[in-house]
Image (cartoon, rainbow, N blue to C red):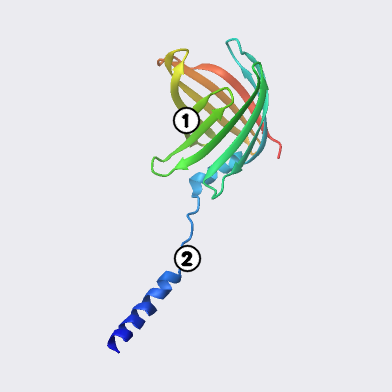
Amino acid sequence: MKRVFVIVVVLAVAMPCLAQTVQPPKPGPEVQKLAYFVGTWKGENELKGGALSGHISGRNDCEWFAGGFHLLCRNESTGPAGKHWELSVRAYDEETVTYSFYVIGSSGVTVFAKGSLAGRTWTWLWDEKGWGKPATYRITQVLVSPTSYTFTVEESVTGAPWTVLEKGKATKIK
């Protein structure tokens, strides 16, 4: 009888603990800063220097991935090299206290950039070989209004001053 009483007491204490449902984690305020980019954007930019210089226009559709921690974007653009498609994912890493920006493109491009937000300016940096030499690349996005931002893509080969590769503007259309 004593054993049954102990089991009943243990179950009475344990059942409320077991009955509690585990809540999935929720995105924090740093993740929510990526919400600016949710929607459909139309972009116009100029590619500078090289054989592929010229005007590029495109559309970027961004939405939250399931769970709300990652921003998933699909881009389609047309420029001097013809049609180009990209898929990108942006996220915030609480451990490293940085943003990440991963891009793959139909031309074979793969970019993994680390980023930060200071005021209304996003800055994304990554390293790779530029024209066969080590280079650092930088994308700067300035949030001009809730529906518009400008951007600049730059390169610094082996620590040389930054060279502008591309400049443009994006406007939210929905």
Which amino acid does the dot numbered 2 rest on?
Thr
Work out whether residue 120 can be spotted.
no
**Real-space CA distance between mark 1 and mark 2, rounded to the nearest whole angstrom:** 37 Å
Instruction: Indicate the position of residue 54 as horizontal and vertical percent values.
Output: 65, 15
Instruction: Indicate the position of residue 31 as horizontal and vertical percent values.
Output: 51, 45
Q: Is residue 115 above or below residue 166?
A: below
User: Quick one: quadrant of the C terminus?
Assistant: top right
Residue at 53% over, 37% down: 89
Q: Is residue 15 above or below residue 62?
A: below
Classify mark 2: helix, strand or loop.
loop
Q: Is the C-beta separation of discs 1 and 2 under 8 Å? A: no
Q: Say which of 164 and 137 sits in front.
A: 137
Residue at 28% over, 88% down: 2
Residue at 44% over, 21% down: 128
Instruction: Indicate the position of residue 101 as horizontal and vertical percent values.
Output: 50, 34
Residue at 54% over, 29% down: 104
Q: Which residue is mark 2?
A: 21
Work out whether residue 1 can be spotted.
yes
Q: Is residue 82 above or below residue 174?
A: above
Q: Which residue is mark 1?
A: 113
Classify mark 1: helix, strand or loop.
strand
